[in-house]
Amino acid sequence: MLSVKNASEIKIGKNGKSLIEALPGLFDALSPENSMGKYRGEISSLSVSHSRIFIVGFGKAAYSMYAGMRKFLQKMPVVADIIVPDQMETENTFDELRILRGTHPETSSRSVEATETMLRDLGTLNDTDIVFVLISGGGSALFEEPEPGFTIDEISRIGKCMMLNGADIREMNVVRGAMSAVKSGKLARVLYPATVKAYIISDVIGDDISVIASGPLNAPSADRMFINDTITKYSGLCGYRADDLISASNAITDRKYFNRVSNTIVLRNHDFVAGLSKLIEERCGDVAVLGSDIRGDVTTVSAYIAGTCRSIYDLKGHGFWLVFGGETTVRVTGSGKGGRNQELAVRFALEMEPGEHYTVLAIGTDGIDGKSPAMGAIIDDSSMSTLKKIGVEEYLRDNDSYTLLSKGGSALITGFTGTNVSDICAIRYDRD
């Protein structure tokens, strides 16, 4: 069960306390383990209709997904391997399950070693086998095998460079997929000719399976213009030859590798937005839902959300809650500890004017926001006054929102949650 480890240290009013109290129930109801229950019949049927069962998984939710499907298997898997972040505490209660460790958010040789071990364990597959693949957020960094001609150091360096230059997840995955031997559909080639059934937890806007974990089982995109433009866009900034990556990005041309592959999304950001909205409505009343596709730089998004709150208030004439999800970006210029959710919460609070009253919760559903140990932030009028006394602008310039928020009692710390469907935000807005 999710718990806010520093709950006693958080300085927040009644609305904020109500939000914090609601979080454990939300995460339990929408846990990957519980979500896999929707597919019990399918899992059971597939496990008895094939000669051998193999299960592989990678991402922050891999263990919980495995626990959720394990009870529906009709026979034990020949191989059960998952890759999770090296700093994620995972207690293995399954004798047959092998837990491998990779690095996140940056990939490394440790991720490559785990991936190579997993692929070796699969051995030789045939057309009577089934491979269940459990994919969730973090998979891009944790599951990696470089294409010939590229090194893991190059992949890590270029990925970090793109992140620092504000690349969104779609752009990141285009470039990573080109340099990888297991992304952008290339895992399907590795698993051929077995039947492949993937269960996926989406951490991207639009739930595009070509983007989640860099689309290891998705047939390559036909949108060559976007691929080529993205590779070219970051080539000068991040020091690689665009022609080499464009050539590598079109590695799979034979569609036979995907004829026996099926992908199913089991959990997405929309589920958390809907769940949080329902909880708030039951506890606190009027809720407006903005959707699950909020994206863009945190400075722009915070101003947009503040304006949206004012517009909705003008229509309603009374206070309300606003709930939305998505994924913002931060252009990192400083060396501090922070994350996009913490910075979004602070910047939204800065947009507020005298006479406006608010509580803002902005969190990453995986429990780790950016380069910090915090899940995100919760701020209201009163706690923002404390943060301003500490010195908000100085910390923002250094991208050090976590240090600011921890000093002001506004950071939420839960540790890894065992899931990842990107970010959610709830705001209570009212006026004098």
Image (cartoon, rainbow, N blue to C red):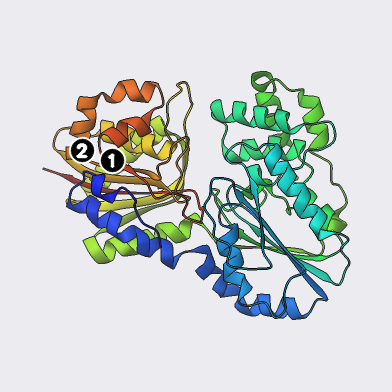
In what quadrant of the picture does the C terminus appear? top left
Q: Percent from the top left, x then y, of residue 267?
A: 53, 61
Tell me the number on the disc at residue 395. Answer: none
Circle nearer the N terminus (2, 1): 2
Q: Residue at x 22, y 35 (%)?
A: 384
Residue 334 occupies quadrant: top left
Q: Residue at x 70, y 32 (%)?
A: 155
Q: Percent from the top left, x then y, of residue 399?
A: 41, 26
Q: Residue at x 58, y 62 (%)?
A: 92
* Nearest the eye: 212 or 157: 157
Number of numbered discs: 2
Q: Is residue 180 left or right of residue 284?
A: right
Mark 2 Cα shell of 10 Å, populated few (<14), some (14-19), many (≥20): many
The residue that mark 2 highlights is 383
Is residue 219 something one can see in this rendering?
no
* Nearest the eye: 97 or 33: 97
Tell me the number on the disc at residue 410. Answer: 1
Q: Are marks 2 and 1 in contact (CB under 8 Å)?
A: yes
The amino acid on which the numbered mark 2 sits, given as a three-letter code, is Ser
Q: Spatial distance from mark 2 to mark 1, Cα to Cα?
A: 7 Å
Q: Percent from the top left, x then y, of residue 81?
A: 70, 59
* Nearest the eye: 311 or 239: 239
Q: Residue furthest left?
A: 432
Is residue 272 something one can see in this rendering?
yes
Q: Is residue 73 left or right of residue 309?
A: right
346 versus 4 height, above or below: above
Residue 226 occupies quadrant: top right
- Label 2 SS: helix
The amino acid on which the numbered mark 1 sits, given as a three-letter code, is Ser
